[in-house]
Amino acid sequence: MLLSMTGYGEARYQSDKLNLSIELQSLNNRHLKLIVRAPEPYNLLEPEFEKIVRAVIRRGTVQLHLHCKRAHSVQDFQINAVAVESYVTQLREMADRLHLPALYSDAVVAQTLVLPGVAAEPGVALFSADEEWPVLEKVLREALGKLQTMRHEEGKAMAQEFLVYRRQIAGALELIRAKAPQVVVSYRERLQDRVGAMLAELDLKIDRSDLIKEVAIFAERSDIAEEITRLSSHLDQFLEIMNEPESPGRKLEFLTQEMFRETNTIGSKANDVEISRQVVEIKGTLEKIRELVQNVE
């Protein structure tokens, strides 16, 4: 079963006090990377988010966007008196040391209201991880389920493309298999004709065993039977891996590299125009597979 590494999922929750949504978007990556974008204090729950995501997704960059709105109450808008007192004391002491006028000192003191820790973000004071985590977990799992559904559907589409490409390669390979035995025969005939013409022109003779030896050397160098067998085996293995229960992106990447290796060897050893043409076709199809397999988990 193939899973795409790209997808999108979203889930929402709404009540009288809380309105939140989680969006998940996954992109290609060789490893799993989770990026959490959430307002305070929900960003502190990133380790919990990651545990849930890792239990489902193995590869890819997953972007998690958490949007939250809550109904405000009087308790949301409170000033931290301890922080204000500390800031004011320090600022006044600094103003005295620098001999700043009292009016300037008072103006600086007024700016303490915007300093960190003086006024908390609305809703932070009411946040309770124990109370809100069950809701967050439910929304996250729902969004994750929708993400997986999309990744699964895209995986099905990719599987159909892989099957088409596999058939194209298998067809080209059969043409190479049928043509391969004729390569040596054609070479022997061409060699005999050329040598015969040269000998007739120069009125010379050549030992037939030398001609046979030359043909045998060529046959050994251009023998692609082993490469054809291995490439055919790789095609069968590709189909088997596609049907594994877990998405086998890494295996397919490795197998595609091996098919490229065998195809290049066939192209370098087979001294034949038609075989070379089929090798070009196979390599073009393998390049399409390599691009597509980058998106398989």
Image (cartoon, grey):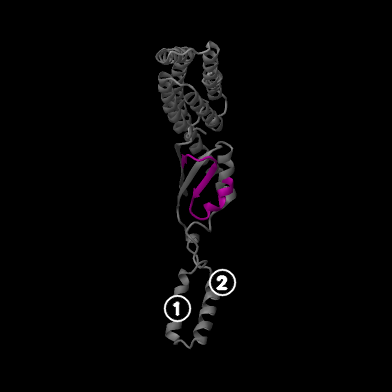
Q: Position of residue 175 (x, y in %)?
A: 44, 15
- Residue at image location 51% in from the left, 55% down from the top: 40
Residue 285, disc: none
State the extent of the magenta-drawn residues as a range.
24-48
- The Cα–Cα distance between marks 1 and 2, rounded to whole angstroms, is 17 Å
What amino acid is found at the position of numbered circle 1 in the picture? Val
Residue lying at the far front of the rendered structure:
203
Q: Nearer the viewer, residue 282 or 275?
A: 275
Q: Nearer the viewer, residue 251 or 296?
A: 251
Q: Position of residue 184 (x, y in %)?
A: 49, 14
Residue 164 visible from this viewpoint: no
Let me know if residue 36 is in the magenta part: yes
Q: Earlier in the sequence, mark 1 or mark 2?
A: 2
**Residue matched to label 1:** 108
Q: Nearer the viewer, residue 91 or 147?
A: 147
Callout 1 environment at 10 Å: few (<14), some (14 to 19), or many (20+)? some
SS for tag 1? helix
Residue 248 visible from this viewpoint: yes
Let me know if residue 224 is in the magenta part: no
Tell me: residue 115, above or below residue 151. Answer: below
Tell me: residue 175, above or below residue 24. Answer: above
- The mark lying in front, picked from 1 and 2, is 1
Q: Nearer the viewer, residue 179 or 208?
A: 208
Quarter of the image for residue 273 reads top left
SS for tag 2? helix
- Residue at image location 49% in from the left, 84% down from the top: 95
**Residue matched to label 2:** 82
What amino acid is found at the position of numbered circle 2 in the picture? Val
Callout 2 environment at 10 Å: few (<14), some (14 to 19), or many (20+)? few
Tell me: residue 147, above or below residue 263. Answer: below
